[in-house]
Amino acid sequence: MPRREYPGEEEYRKLFAKYAERDEQKKTRIQKLKERTRSFSDPDDFMLVILELFNEREFIPQPGKYYTFVYQAKTPKIVYDEHPLIACLSLQNWGFTGLNFHFPMVRNYTWNEVIGQMHVVNDDEIEYMKSVPYQKMITK
């Protein structure tokens, strides 16, 4: 009977990496977020991972959709959320109105104070995202 050759250790590593990558691609954004933020407590750390994973972005939000983004209010002496999670309610010339789930209350957001783009949160992700402690309340 001829001797059978088996792949070496390096081939097994490559094969395992291929299957691990396939499994990683099947995970939802929420599953990835849960895994990567398991030991987090700082809102900025959460937000960095959220911005990376929620990479579907829009410049202008659409009413009826959910978003998260970085915001730096210009109005003095107000408390605001630097990492809002919102349902966009309406568009205006000056910006947009959204229900911020971290307060919860309706807030106005001006275009110039949105840092970067709006990161889309899908309908099936919003309930979990409301439980993630990444709100960052700041007094201007």
Image: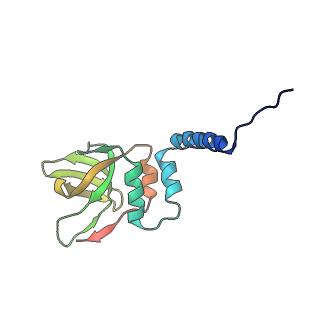
Q: Residue at x 42, y 60 (%)?
A: 46
Tell me which corner region of the image, top left, top right, bottom left or bottom right, holds residue 72.
Answer: bottom left
- Height in image: 131 above or below 6? below
Q: Position of residue 90 (x, y in %)?
A: 22, 46
- Height in image: 58 above or below 128? above
Residues 128 and 17: in front is 17
Q: Quadrant of the N terminus?
A: top right
Q: Residue at x 49, y 44 (%)?
A: 28
Residues 116 and 100: in front is 116
Q: Residue furthest right?
A: 1
Q: Residue at x 12, y 48 (%)?
A: 93
Q: Position of residue 71 (x, y in %)?
A: 26, 59
Residues 4 and 80: in front is 4
- In the displayed structure, does residue 38 sit left or right of residue 83? right
- In the displayed structure, does residue 70 sit left or right of residue 132? left
Q: Residue furthest top?
A: 1
